[in-house]
Amino acid sequence: MMIALKAATPQLPRTTAVADHVVAVDETDSTNALAVQMIGDGSLTLPDHQDGELAVAVVAADRQTAGRGRNGHKWVSQPGRCSTMSYAVRIPRAIATDESVNGWLQMIAGLVTLDALNGMIEEYGAAPNQPDCSLELKWPNDVFCHGLKLGGLLSELVIPPSSGTGTDADADDDVVIVFGVGLNLALGACRLPTPQSTSLQLHVSGLPSFGEMRDEVAERQVEGFRERLVKFIADPKGQAESLREEVKAVCWARGRQVEAHFTDGTTLTGEAIGLNEDASLILRTQDGTDHTVRTADVGVL
């Protein structure tokens, strides 16, 4: 019989030392929903973006009762085993709403997450159980290991109360992007929510306690978001090309036969051959035609 785990308020001393604001609760419906609510009612504020500086706030919970993924999917997590965090940043509205570059914001969140996980593993001297236990990104928002889902990301745009809306909106205004990151860090095989999911501890030996892992990864994510987004805001087009090359090396789907599932119920099958300049996926069908995929769930065949 599986014993129910009790939620406890996350202890995040390392994250608190680097973040501009940390909100930690034992339980909430969704850390993204809580962050969005707090930004909307003014209880969570971030200073305006300044050149070369970026504030990052963190909302953390040990248990989510209604965790969310892309396209209405649920994110199932367990307290004391899964890290559920949301990172809120203010960036210029012009960049957040520019479809030629804003797709890279999700890719940046994925790279930040890989950097944080790999950095934590290295700091503690942990080691993969097998040589091919590298972490990868499944376009557009999943962390994969051995073809299994280890984590998921969800980004949402929020208009802070100080910004205008509609005809009052100014292109120079800042908006807030909330990046939700759910990671299976210490789940045993018997607790995995689906056969397609996995957990870091199943692939890496010598890891620290769950609490240490959660705090260390979150600290690195705060610093990673700050560093990468400052560069992106300064030069979105230039950074897009650099990011495309970086993502190519960790893109799990590239070179595989995949099936894209769209929200209207249609599907498209082909080889994922890379990313476009706007971070959309290039899918080559059997007849040699290249298709652009911007919003879909992608699974390997």
Image (cartoon, rainbow, N blue to C red):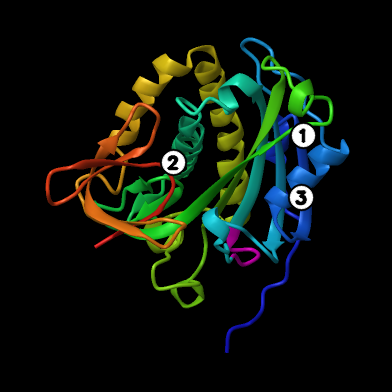
Name the residue that disc number 2 marks: 114
Amino acid type of the residue tagged 1 in the rendering: His
Dominant secondary structure of the residues highlighted in magenta in the image: loop
Q: Is residue 204 left or right of residue 37?
A: left
Residue 218 x/y as whole percent:
60, 41
Compared to 266, does 225 lie above or below? above
Q: CA distance from mark 3 to mark 2?
A: 24 Å
Q: CA distance from mark 3 to mark 1?
A: 14 Å
Amino acid type of the residue tagged 2 in the rendering: Leu
Q: Which quarter of the image is occupied by the C terminus?
A: bottom left
Q: Is residue 62 left or right of residue 295?
A: right
Compared to 242, does 109 lie above or below? below
Q: CA distance from mark 2 to mark 1?
A: 23 Å
Name the residue that disc number 3 marks: 34
Dot 2 lies on which element?
A: helix
For image coordinates 72% across by 71% down, the residue present is: 6
Dot 3 lies on which element?
A: helix
Residue 55 x/y as whole percent:
70, 25
* The magenta stretch spans residue 6: no
On the question of residue 296 being in view, the answer is yes
Residue 21 is labelled as 1
On the question of residue 12 being in view, the answer is no
- Which residue range is magenta in the image? 77-82
Structural crowding at the residue carrying mark 2, measured as other residues with C-alpha within 10 Å and reported as few (<14), some (14–19) or many (≥20): many
Structural crowding at the residue carrying mark 3, measured as other residues with C-alpha within 10 Å and reported as few (<14), some (14–19) or many (≥20): some
Query: Is 205 or 92 nearer to us in this picture?
Result: 92
